[in-house]
Image: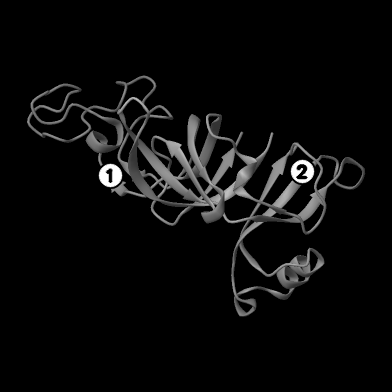
Amino acid sequence: MSGLIGKKIGMTSIFDENGKNIPCTVIEVTPNVVTQVRTIEVDGYEALQLGFDDKSDKHATKAELGHFKKAGTSAKRKVVEIKDFAGEYKLGDAIAVDLFLEGEFVDVQGVSKGKGFQGVVKRHGFGGVGQVTHGQKNRLRAPGSVGASSYPSRVFKGMRMAGRTGGVNVTVQNLRVLKVVADKNLLVVKGAVPGHKNSYVIIQK
């Protein structure tokens, strides 16, 4: 398994050779620096720790500065470990966007947009207005009955109710790589990826 950290730029669309308009997402993938190499002998597993997106030294702790100094790089905003990374890399190596090839499929992981505290209609797709079911009578977007009579006299765990929506880790699988623009550090994948603009994403193949 291989992967890199990127930043979601936004969505656009491109035309393929048949003239079909394809929605796609543009991800900026500046070279990721190997900030630590995990080994079975020392750590019990194999992985590469990658750093992405520079930040000023004044915003980093002394422990972070020492850690990045070993790799010979500046402080990074985002650090991610990827297990069983294909290929041999050593501390301080930079891995560019040309790790990916046009036409192959990747998985993209990110934190979905937070939508705040939402009701059951928006959060779980309940019927709401016009579909008076679930014991809600004339209360429109209310959740309706949630109990289970005198037995077991409680609400079951996992009951779909109102609550905070979004802001969770989401992985979208099998997105096709449409373009790799190596000179501009850009990756264009088909479809949508989780997160808002300028949010960090992890692309794995």
Crowd tier of the residue under label 2, counting other residues whose Cα lies within 10 Å: few below 14, some 14–19, many 20 or above: many
Amino acid at the residue labelled 2: Ala
* Nearer the observer, 193 or 143: 193
Q: Earlier in the sequence, mark 1 or mark 2?
A: 2
Q: Position of residue 164 (x, y in %)?
A: 36, 46
Position in image of residue 117 (x %, y %):
30, 48
Between residues 178 and 10, which one lies in front from this camera angle? 178
In the displayed structure, would residue 202 be above or below residue 68? above
Residue 55 percent location from the top left of the image: 59, 71
Residue 121: name its quadrant: top left
CA separation, marks 1 and 2? 39 Å
- Number of marks: 2
When asked about the image quadrant of residue 191, the answer is top left
Residue under the image location 39 percent in, 51 percent down: 196
Location of the N terminus (image quadrant): top right
- Mark 1 closeness class: few <14, some 14–19, many ≥20 residues within 10 Å: some
Q: Is residue 118 above or below residue 127?
A: below
Q: Is residue 89 left or right of residue 50?
A: right
Q: Secondary structure at mark 2?
A: strand
Q: Which mark is residue 118?
A: 1
Residue depicted at x 52% and y 55%: 184
Horizontally, residue 55 falls left or right of residue 10, namely right
Q: Secondary structure at mark 1?
A: strand
Disc number lying in front (1 or 2) = 2
What is the quadrant of the C terminus in the image? top right
Q: Which mark is residue 47?
A: 2
